[in-house]
Image: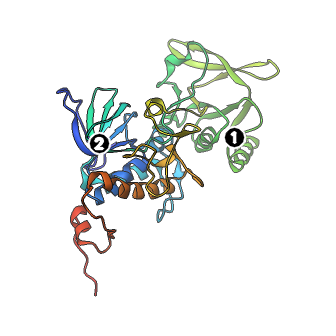
Amino acid sequence: MKSENALLLAATQSSGQPAETDAVIVGAGPVGLFQVFELGLLEIKAHVIDSLAEVGGQCTELYPDKPIYDIPAIPVCTGKELTDALLKQIVPFGATFHLGQEVTRVQKQDDGRFLVETSKAERFLTKVVIVAGGVGSFQPRTLKVEGIDRFVGTQLHYRVKDPAQFAGQSVVIAGGGDSALDWALNFVGKAESLVLIHRRDEFRAAPASVAKIKAHCEQLQMQLLMGHISGFHEENGRLIEVRVTSADGLTRRLPLDHLLVFFGLSPKLGPIAEWGLDLERKQVAVDTEKFETNVPGIFAVGDINIYPGKKKLILSGFHEAALAAFGATRYVFPDRKIHLQYTTTSPKLHKILGVESPTFD
């Protein structure tokens, strides 16, 4: 995903010499992108690394069209729209993105900096590391039916990137959480036929969504089947039906064009667990002054961190990013006294942002 010139992708380094930078941000979701902005206001340059092939984190990977209602001053936006806006906002700061790779190693150097290495053999010498990795490196939980994985990306989907491709199609959705029900509600009246499959008559989704699903079923606008997918049938290389087995052992054959599976995410901290950070329930413990970890110079913001009263909201992550940026200045500019300035009135910040200073009567 690109927005104007905000997304500067770096070619894989081959010289063996690490790139030197002020900060490395691990994670290119909304909080990681806003971290670029907050660092930029303090003249801190950043490289951003993410395991996904696109920026935006879960917002664009799993829910690009799902509405978000709790971003200040924005009554409603989609995950994609939020990501696009954040990318536009960080244009002045020229952050470099390294996508489709994980951070595999973080090692403190004698001069106080960190040597950061990635799965694509890119190396960085950085003064601070800011982990904004959401729930960590994550993968959708897959459907455990032998042989069906060969249809992934064509007829079997673990995420929705282009909702229009399912219009007028026979769609089967498996799952009982918010994602499954949200997409089922989205496709009502758009798909030629729509069936939601869940193991039991108890859902992990919002009660209002469950009520809407049942109302649509009563109006014969979709079907709800209790059971699990136990097999499939193909013809000429295409998936044409799945077999659904209920708790009483009865198996039904269900024709389809597309199968969407939303069994949730399997979060993995991955190499982060080996960095020597204090962890609580697979989350990184931080202070609430700077959102710094137990390792000086490593910060954690967003859903990856934990502290008393933590709320997993994008809004909370934005607040954490602002304080982490001020905490990072201690390492990036140890001899500089940092004063709080306001983007409304500061000529220096206006210059950094490339905007004209307003005049007030």
Up the image or down, 315 lies above or below 264; here it is below
From the viewer's perspective, tell me whether residue 293 is left or right of residue 146.
Answer: left
Q: Residue at x 73, y 47 (%)?
A: 211
Task: Determine the secondary structure under disc 2.
Answer: loop
Residue 174 x %, y %: 64, 30
Up the image or down, 232 lies above or below 179; here it is above
Report which quarter residue 122 is drawn in. top left
| Sooner in the amino-acid sequence: mark 2 or mark 1 | 2
Residue 85 visible, this orientation: no
Q: Quadrant of the C terminus?
A: bottom left
Residue identified by numbered label 1: 204
Report which quarter residue 145 is drawn in. top right
Residue identified by numbered label 2: 112
Tell which of 131 and 238 is nearer to you. Answer: 131
Up the image or down, 116 lies above or below 94; here it is above
Residue 108 visible, this orientation: yes
Q: Residue at x 32, y 69 (%)?
A: 341
Local crowd size for mark 2, using a 10 Å CA cut-off: few (<14), some (14–19), many (≥20): some
Up the image or down, 229 lies above or below 102; here it is above
Residue 21 x %, y %: 24, 44
Residue 22 x %, y %: 26, 47
Inter-mark Cα distance, 2 to 1: 46 Å
Tell which of 51 and 274 is nearer to you. Answer: 274
